[in-house]
Amino acid sequence: MLNGFALFHLNLAFSSIEEEQRATVVRDCYGPLLDLAESHGPIGIEATAYTLQAIAKCDAGWLARLRDLIARGRCEFIGSGYAQAIGPLLPADMLAANLRLGNEAYQKLLGLVPRIALVNEQAWSGGLVGQYLDAGYDALLMDWDNVANFHPDWAPALRYAPQRALGSDGRVIPILWTNTVAFQKLQRLAHDDISLEDYLEFVSGQRGAEDRTVCLYASDAEIFGFRPGRYRTEESNQGGTEWTRLKGAFAGLASLPDVRIVSPSDALKDAKQTTPIRLETAPYPIPVKKQRKYNVTRWAVSGRDDIAVNAACQRIHDALLRTHAPDDDWRELCRLWASDFRTHITQARWERYCRDLAAMEARLGTAPPAAALPAAAGDTATDRYIEIETPAIRARLDRRRGLAIQRAGFAPDFTPLIGGIPHGHFDDIALQADWYTGDCVFEAPGEPKVTDLDWATTHIARAGDGTVTVHGAVSTPLGPIIKVMTFHANSPRIDFELEFQWENWNRGALRLGHITLLGEAFDEDSLSFITTNGGVPERFALAGQTVEHGAPVSFLVSAACALGMTEGWIELADKTRKVRIEVDRAVAPLVGLVNHRSTGGKLFCQLMLSALELDDTRKPSPYGTGPRRFRFSIIG
């Protein structure tokens, strides 16, 4: 028997839907969806609480009808939170608030709290498991295809049965797999791109000798009977005929031998007690849905000005924690942190969003100060190399390379842990370059690379306790980069404060820090990276792994993956040593990109901090004006 279930995702905050179009979407998409459930259910319907509230403003009767269909078993409601915010990019308490406020609203609007959730944008991390369990969820829906691509050892049969996902806190949660190909097949049928016979043949082909479970659909409802006009290649709107084809598809499925339509909860009932599996891997720590162009950087450091609006949300979050703010403020922050404002948002909605975000910042007093970095002070450096020595740090800087750290060691033994690796150190041609620590690189399509690897006008100041501050300025074709590095006397900590005095922030990738481990100081077999992606810390072993988070996916997409670093830190550590990097998320919530491999018996491991990436969502339109600031620290 093939058990097929379908789930329709409702989102009135969808980036390309103007607010004045919402009533049309409810009438032409959501109404026919309930008709489909009435005639061919059970069907899953998932929406954020914000979307349900927006639907009620357009058509209060729609929610009443949904409640009735749920009561009669024609619909099953699937949860996701108050707003569609990306869990692996949120501080843990923010994600918990989003889930809690969503459940409270579901109870009020529908008279129930859902037991199954669709992971928002199907952006997964191991830290989410405990979060959803603590919020009362019994199971999650997650995409199979991209996850399985990084688990070649998995048996293909795993895709046809519910599994149990292992979280980073050791707890497990049942998983229902969604299926990218299957949902695209149904979309193509509805858009008259394939025939009903072709579609039914595809579904029939999913049957096997044993019982199987397949997700027939787990995507947007708004693409049937409505077109936002975002794509030039968009199919013409065929109105109600698309919903007619969908009804024909479900009627056809019901007629197939050994195929039955079940609810998501019924699909879970067939789950067996399987060995828990870990979905995330070191090369792919935050899996997402669909093609590889959909990676977490699109909501973190791309869009119109993701890095700036995410920093503003972080500042608001911090202020709400300090003041024990009411839930209304947390609900508004959930809305402001939603994913749709970070992708293909329309100009009118972007302008309103910026006004709303700025208004909340003004009310809470969280806007960043406009003052520039302190002026250069101390002695003027004239030599190429600058030797730094404090009671806690010994380092050497290369003034000809923008004050890149050539080597740095920390108390008590001062073994150099980070620094530069010269050209020719590795035999692998892919690593035949000079590798630095502390530098900045901007790459734009078709343009020469812009870096700070040039002579830095440098001043050095020494405090009474032995702390050393190095102030450097480097000219670039896009404008000056100011770099202030503080080498502490009382702790093994190097603080970086960067200011980019650039007028234009166009399409491209900007990566900072490039913290490069000196391989001979670390044990390769026990090396790992540890960070947070929306929950408790997650550890990823690096032995035997090739990791290239920052590798381009295509000419359009500059990175393959990233780390959320949602509590503001990441550690590179072996069994005896570690390097910790901390990011000031209120200034700029940089994300992490790990580059790791072993070649010819030599270890290469580097962490880049990304402030900007290129993809199809990038449409430069700044939230604020003036120089851009970035602040991070390296701790031995």
Image (cartoon, helix red, strand yellow):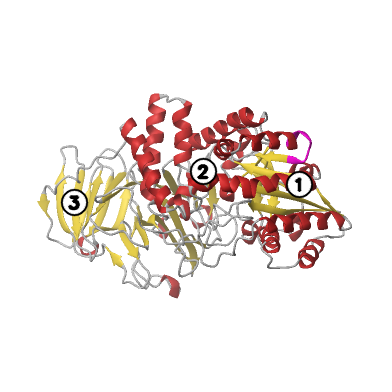
Image point (24%, 63%), residue name: 478
| In the image, residue 327 lies in the stretch drawn in magenta | no
Which residue position is annotated with label 1?
274
Does dot 1 land on a helix, a strand or a loop? Answer: loop
Q: Is residue 507 visible?
A: yes
Q: Are there few (<14), some (14-19), or many (20+) residues within 10 Å of tag 1?
A: few
The residue stretch that appears in magenta? 70-75
Q: Position of residue 202 (x, y in %)?
A: 77, 65
Q: Amino acid at mark 2?
A: Ala
Q: Are marks 3 and 1 in contact (CB under 8 Å)?
A: no
Q: Position of residue 314 (x, y in %)?
A: 39, 39
Q: Is residue 575 visible?
A: no
Report the Cα–Cα distance between label 2 and label 3. Answer: 38 Å
Which residue position is annotated with label 2?
85
Whichever of callouts 2 and 1 sits on the residue coming sooner in the sequence is 2
Report the Cα–Cα distance between label 2 and label 1. Answer: 30 Å
Which residue position is annotated with label 3?
471
Q: Amino acid at mark 3?
A: His
Q: Nearer the viewer, mark 2 or mark 3?
A: 2
Image point (67%, 28%), residue name: 111
**Residue 80 drawn above or below residue 619:** above
Q: Position of residue 367 (x, y in %)?
A: 30, 38
Residue 512 shown left or right of residue 467 in the figure: right
| In the image, residue 74 lies in the stretch drawn in magenta | yes
Residue 514 shown left or right of residue 254 in the figure: left
Q: Which mark is residue 431?
A: none
**Residue 472 drawn above or below residue 118:** below
Residue 482 shown left or right of residue 562 in the figure: left
Image point (38%, 50%), residue name: 307
